[in-house]
Structures are given as C-alpha cells and as structure tokens.
Amino acid sequence: IRLSLVGSEMCIRDSSMSLFRLDASILPASSASRSLADLVEAEWTASHPDSTVTRRDLAADPVPATAWADAVTGGFVEEAQRTDAQRAARALATTFADELIAADALLFAVPLYNYGVSQHFKTWFDLAYTDPRIDPQGTALRGKPATLVTVLGGNYAPGTPKEGWDHSTGWLRRVLEDVWGLDLRVVERPFTLVGVNPALDAFADTARELKENAEQSARTYGRELAALRGEVA
C-alpha cells in the first residue's frame, strides 16, 4: 500500500479495487452528506479493505468558475492557438474524466443548496462533461455502479408545503443515470435543518426517523456498491 494526494486529500493506494468519492458540502465539520457518505464508504472498505479511495473535495479544492468556458472555447481552436487558461482547463477536464473512468465504483455526496444544485458540483460536472469520453455518445461510464448521497434542509416530498422546490435531486439523477448511464442508487435525507432552525422544531420526530432511514439506506447501498462491482470484476 502507498499513499498519495489527489484533489488536496490523502488517498490510500492499492492495485486491486478503486472507489472515487466526491464531496460538495461547504461545511465539512458538520456536513450531513459527508456523514452519510462515510457510511457508504465504510461498507465499501469493509468489502475491499485494500482498495484505493480517490477523493475530490470540491469545497477544499473548488473548480475555477472560468474553467468550463475556457475548456469549451479551447476546443474550437488548434492546440497551438489555445491560451494558457484554455490548455489548463482542458487538462483539468481530462483529469476529472480519468478519475471517473479509472474507478471501479463512484460515490457522490452533494447537498441541496438554495433549492438548487450545488454550484461546486455543477462547475465540476460541466468541466468533466467536456471530455468526449463521457459525453452522451461515450460509453466509458455506462453501467458503472454509483451511489449518490444528497441531503435537504427542508422536506420537499409530495404533499408538503414546498413540494417541487427541490431542483437538485432530479437534475443529479438525470445527469448521472441518463447522461452518464451509471447504475445509480440514491440516499436522500430531508429535514437536516431540524434542530438548527427553530421554525422546524415541531418536526423533530419525523426528522429523526428520516435520518435513521437514510443511514440504513447508506449502509445497504454501500454493501450493494461493493457487491455489484464484485459481480462484474
């Protein structure tokens, strides 16, 4: 086993199995999405104790906001005519795609922010998506097992007052399942602001049950993530 740094985080290197994990929470010390992803990863590691875990932390190492535009415009000109920013952006896109393609399984921890997709994740996805190996015609990620962990401060389920206000989860499922073709399982935990926002104190019992259900799903899907890879290895 050897150690290396990827995306500003320490990785455990082994030549057998590999898990790619991406975190998008801006509050690592108190992140509900990271806690659930830890449960998924723990199940993976229990099945593959000598595996590689490659981490990309988008809060600690955010993607430059201009990178996507630089990568796209750089594709319209010959290499010799590209700016330094265009070359750097396209190289970073290649790195992102390499990380996804090289992994045996994928784990994404992406919270809902302001009723929409995390800007950190969206910027990362847009840049990675410029690599032709993982565009809609690409097959490099088709069928790869993956788990998405997402958390929501409120509750946007059918019948709730803010039903339909979650504009993140549906988009995440669309790009990961339909665009990239991943074999995806989703762990979702609503009401993470219960206990933080006094206006939600009345939902403490519901929030506790939803948290327990999400933790159980995380463990279950972590085991499935490891087992699915075992079937195709």
Image: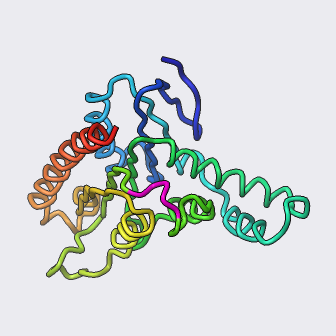
Q: Position of residue 223 (x, y in %)?
A: 22, 40
Colouring style: rainbow
Quarter of the figure with the C terminus: top left
Q: In this view, does 145 lie to the left or right of 194?
A: right
The overriding secondary structure of the stretch rendered in magenta is loop
Q: Judge whether residue 203 is colored magenta.
A: no
The image quadrant of residue 162 is bottom left
- Tell me what residue is drawn at x 24 percent, y 58 percent: 189
Image position of 206 with respect to 27: above or below = below
User: What percent of the width, then of the height, locates residue 231?
Assistant: 26, 40
Identity of the residue furthest to the top in this view: 1
Residue 56 in picture, x, y percent from top left: 52, 44
Number of numbered markers:
0
For this rendering, which residue is in front, 213 or 30? 213
Residue for point 34% across, 72% down: 170
In the rendered view, would you say 102 is above or below 46?
below
Front one among 96 and 41: 96
Residue that appears at 57% across and 26% down: 4
- Which quarter of the picture shows residue 77? bottom right
Which one is nearer the viewer's eye here, 106 or 169? Answer: 106
Residue name at image x 62 percent, y 64 percent: 130
In the image, is 119 to the left or to the right of 228?
right
Looking at the rendering, the stretch of residues picked out in magenta corresponds to 138-142
* Image location (x, y in percent) of residue 168: 38, 70
